[in-house]
Amino acid sequence: MDIDKIREEFPILAQEVYKKPLVYLDNAATTQKPKVVIDAISNAYCTINANVHRGVHHLSQLSTEGHEGGRERVRQFINAKSTKEIIFTRGTTESINLVASSFGEAFLNEGDEVIISAMEHHSNIVPWQMLESKKGIKLRVIPITPNGELDIDAFRKLLNERTKLISVAHVSNVLGTINPIKDIVEEAHKINVPVLVDGAQGAPHIKIDVQALDVDFYVFSGHKMYAPTGIGVLYGKEKWLEAMPPYQGGGEMIAKVTFEKTTFNELPFKFEAGTPDYVGVMAMTAALDYIENVGIENIAAHETGLLQYTTSKLSEIEGITIYGNATHKSGVISFNVDGIHPYDIGMLLDKQGVAVRTGHLCAQPLMDLLGIPGVVRASFALYNTHEECDKFIVALQRAIEICR
Ligand code: PLP
């Protein structure tokens, strides 16, 4: 990978912050966008913008081709069987809410259990909690081991005849742990329980093959993988999506409407009420092309190199605690410095041009479990360099000096 060339493709990276070169290490929150993605948005609005599906005119046909071509692109990217299984949403959060609402309506009743894990993002906790109060289901939580891995023995013990769904993160946004999805799916399928995987932190870094993983649902956000905000994906096996009722009502999702009765459109449109974000889909197509041109395995290898390098440098600093030391770990380092609030570290890093995330990272139950109010998190993308990791370490040492 030619990192210098890659960096030139991301205009925002050339910026200075407080007269210091920007070191952007907040990629797990959102990634920066390459020029091809920004151009795809601009081109769509400059040359083909028209609403999709309903128009007979030239521009509408081009727009529809771009939108449906994007669906096929996503299908290939995750190796789904059919484009019927690719539903466009606003992102991971909306995808999980869609499943919670629709699967919940069709298949969950009082006393049924949904299993999540202790390392979930609020997006994969709250929608299920809402079903606890709405339908009387019960949430069960897989505990984690001291190094931040799922306790698989405990998971096996949680499975029982009341279990109706398992919903777990592919990769933890706090600990970086890459969870053994295939093993979880195998266990769950032994008792015919479907598995939803929150791939917000998985799809940007790991080659996803939904058929090989045999997951029932896989969800992710475009903006964490070099695509724009506001566009995301719900993959669902056709048999589940067919059996689930629509999530929202409106245009696009209908076959026929009368005042007496409405029949619904076929998949995937049944779940896509209203004008879709077709420009977002076209730009996401450009982002997926971009990732595949670089090679997701190359991206992962580069990020793992940065993770190992930075982890070892960070470990040399006195008073650092790193959270999450899983054997299989993605490019995320969450840590604290003894006696210093994470927010102070974040502010002082920012003043030196280094962008990191601080706080509970939308994982308050995990923070409670760890007994901390929050963490500082550095997270990597394909355009980060070893030189930036050094700058981060120097800036962190300076921040610690100031606070002590
Ligand atoms: N799940 C995980 C593991 C995440 O890291 C995030 C975002 O940080 C989300 C879900 C929510 O993603 P979005 O805000 O794009 O819907």
Image (cartoon, rainbow, N blue to C red):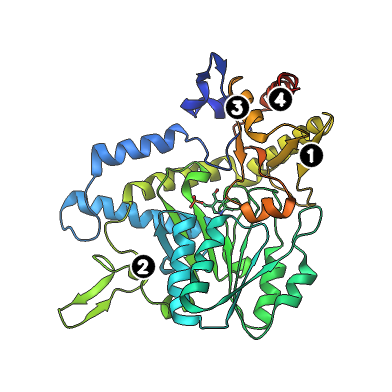
Indicate which disc, 4 or 3, sits on the residue closer to the N terminus.
3
The Cα–Cα distance between marks 3 and 2, rounded to whole angstroms, is 42 Å
Name the residue located 15 percent from the left edge and 79 percent from the top edge: 259
- Check whether the beta carbons of the residues at disc 4 and disc 3 lie within 8 A of each other: no
Q: Residue furthest top?
A: 19
Q: What amino acid is found at the position of numbered circle 1 in the picture?
A: Thr
Spot occupied by residue 151 in the image (x, y as percentages of width and height): 77, 64
The Cα–Cα distance between marks 1 and 2, rounded to whole angstroms, is 44 Å
The Cα–Cα distance between marks 4 and 2, rounded to whole angstroms, is 46 Å
> In the image, is 220 to the left or to the right of 390?
left
Badge number at residue 396: 4
> CB of residue at label 4: within 8 Å of ligand 1?
no
How crowded pointer 1 is (Cα within 10 Å; few <14, some 14-19, many 20+) is rated as some
Quarter holding the C terminus?
top right
Q: What amino acid is found at the position of numbered circle 2 in the picture?
A: Phe
Name the residue located 51 percent from the left edge and 21 percent from the top edge: 14
Badge number at residue 347: 3
Indicate which disc, 1 or 3, sits on the residue closer to the N terminus.
1
Quick one: 54 or 187, which is closer to the camera? 187
Q: Nearer the viewer, mark 1 or mark 2?
A: 1
Indicate which disc, 1 or 2, sits on the residue closer to the N terminus.
2
Spot occupied by residue 65 in the image (x, y as percentages of width and height): 30, 54
